[in-house]
Image (cartoon, coloured by chain):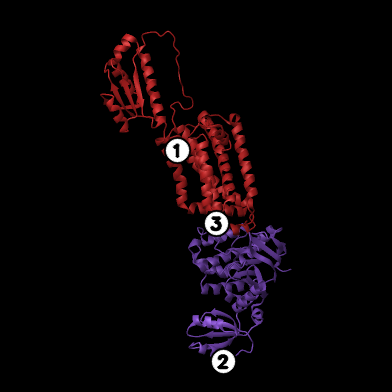
Chain colours: A red, B purple
Amino acid sequence: MKNLLGFVKKEFFHIFRDYRTLLILFGMPVVQLLVFGFALTNDIKNARIAILDHSKDNITSKLTQKILSSGYFILAQNLDSEAGIEDAFKQGNIKQVLIFEADFAEKIEREGTASMQILADASDPNVAKILTNYTTAIVSDFQRELLADKKLPIEVKTEVRMLYNAEMKSVFMFVPGVITVLLLLISAMMTSISIAREKEMGTMEVLLVSPLKPIQIIIGKVVPYVLLAFVIALVILILGYFVFGVPIRGSLILLLGYSLVYILLSLSLGIFISSVVESQQVAMLISMVALMLPTILLSGFIFPIENMPWPLQWLANVIPAKWFIIVMRGVMLKGIGVQILWKETLILFGMIAFFIALSVRKFKIRLQ
Amino acid sequence: MNPISVHHLSKSYGNTKALNSVTFEVNEGEIFGLIGPDGAGKTTLFRLLVTLLLPDCGSAQVLGFDCVKDYKKIRKSVGYMPGRFSLYPDLSVEENLSFFATIFNTTISENYSLIEDIYKQIEPFKARPAGKLSGGMKQKLALCCALIHKPDVLFLDEPTTGVDAVSRKEFWEMLRRIKAQGITIFVSTPYMDEASLCDRVGLMQGGNILSIDTPENIIRKFPHRLLAVRSAETFRLIGDLRECDKINTVYPFGDFLHITPKSPDCDIPEIKDYLEKKAHQHIKISEISANIEDCFMDLMVGQNEEKH
């Protein structure tokens, strides 16, 4: 036991002496969270649009007013003719052009129908789609206002409420996502690199020719990173809670417990990687390519798994991050507990057992 | 029971035979030197003995424990210093030492008397990161770390490679003192001049042990007459002597060439005449006794002839 403590102490020396890595480890979550939280949002505000109004009557100006006051759009340009549309788009700073046909108000009076056209810059399809949705929603709302005094023959009213994230803030999704990615990165990559470093520097040779057991070497390597990763998880949660107002609706203890489970899982992955590689660079490459990419792409952090073709959906099942994200969102946003998340919990524990067993078996007690 | 005994030990890496059926014994309390050039198989032999590699065939016992089956027991009771620097460069001298003491379940103070002589020399730098020590001091620290748990056998793989001449001399003096404490030392070196500092040496080449004996006996067993020759033009001298039909081998040694005449009754004036005819100046020829390197060269030639 004493020699294990000595090993852990040595590991902490390594971590704290390498202050650059430490700075990156603590700087990265903060920066990533700020970037994801503030910059990378799916919500679009203040999109610049142009309006070509052939009618210029009281109804079109009311509608224009309504659209512009929604907060989603800024009027960048008033166009005089169709000829200007192409140029406006090509200059690139206009996302959408609205065209009202001539005699808009009159047609509505007399025929009960008038048309407007929405042209969107679909070189970014997501933005185009979101903006046109916003516009049609505002227009149909406007339509109802016009009809306020008249009665429609039949009407289905829809009332939408966004549960668990009423304002549809993207950061609610990113906080669990960033925790997932970073814990994996820190735990798996740092342990695999630190074991590979011992091999590379030849110190593993000396460690092997000592009474230390393989399991002691593994535990000695893992303990410091468990603590480090746990502190980083706390930093992200605190930042999410106080800066972005991401709620923690479920039990905080449960949330931290799940984080610990996930950290252990990532560490066991890291140990497994290090047992098959010989150098730090290969360890880093494998952690990056084989762990990071699937975690970001297939965990449901950014792209919904339900939209993927079935082979990828199937593949996503073996990615630990997928299950952890489900758990995190469940506990943080929905406030649910183990009684609902028992399946995910079991899967996470199963994965830990699998990888620890595998890496203890794979740990080489000799040089070959 | 001898602390190290090796029987027909072989090891190959792919098609390369690193160790070819090696057999020898190391006696209790001696300094046994394994001497041979790079690639002779010294490191492989070390790694087999400290249980880091598995042999292809043959067996080895360290302190009576089998290197394959009882590897855990061997790991507890030997000290091992690998060929390249294997300490933590970001840990200080003292931290390195106390780390290695802890993993062997001991403390610095418990065995301080054993390392005192050596550690005193690096103690002024005990707060310095090990990576920033000079080559000689790194070796001293590594030796302390290998000794701190009072091993019964000490394995030192090329401890003096890359260390300056003064530090090398000091290092061997330390080994003498460690030996005096009753620890058996198994050491390897590519430097032939260090052979005389061992109690017994094994000359190694191409995975074979050519000869095992005390350094004095190895020299005594040198079967030829040996002459040292020099002239003003060393390079031309080599060529001319190699062409001479009275001479068997010619090897350069510093300023001199060591030559072995073909027949024992070949005399010095005869060779001098031959060289004067070839217009060499300042010729000096003298009878000398062999050193370890001469013996090694001779044994190597013998082995190569056996092969062909």
Residue A170 in the image: x percent, y percent? 44, 32
Residue A230 in the image: x percent, y percent? 52, 42
Q: Secondary structure at mark 1?
A: helix
Residue A200 — which label? Answer: 3
Marks 2 and 1 close (CB-CB < 8 Å):
no
Residue found 49% across the figure and 65% down from its top: B133
Residue B167 in the image: x percent, y percent? 53, 72
The answer to whether tags 2 and 1 share a subunit is no
Residue type, mark 3 in image? Glu
- Provide the chain ID for the residue under circle 1: A
Q: Residues within 10 Å of mark 3 (few under 14, many from 20)?
A: some
Q: Which residue is mark 1?
A: A239
- Residue A121 as seen in the image, left or right of residue B95: left
Q: Secondary structure at mark 2?
A: helix
Residue placed most toward the observer, A28 or B297: B297
- Residue A70 as seen in the image, left or right of residue B144: left
Q: Nearer the viewer, mark 3 or mark 1?
A: 3
- Residue A33 as seen in the image, left or right of residue B205: left
Q: Residues within 10 Å of mark 2 (few under 14, many from 20)?
A: few
Residue B269 — which label? Answer: 2
Whether residue A2 is visible to the viewer of this picture, yes or no, is yes
Q: Secondary structure at mark 3?
A: helix
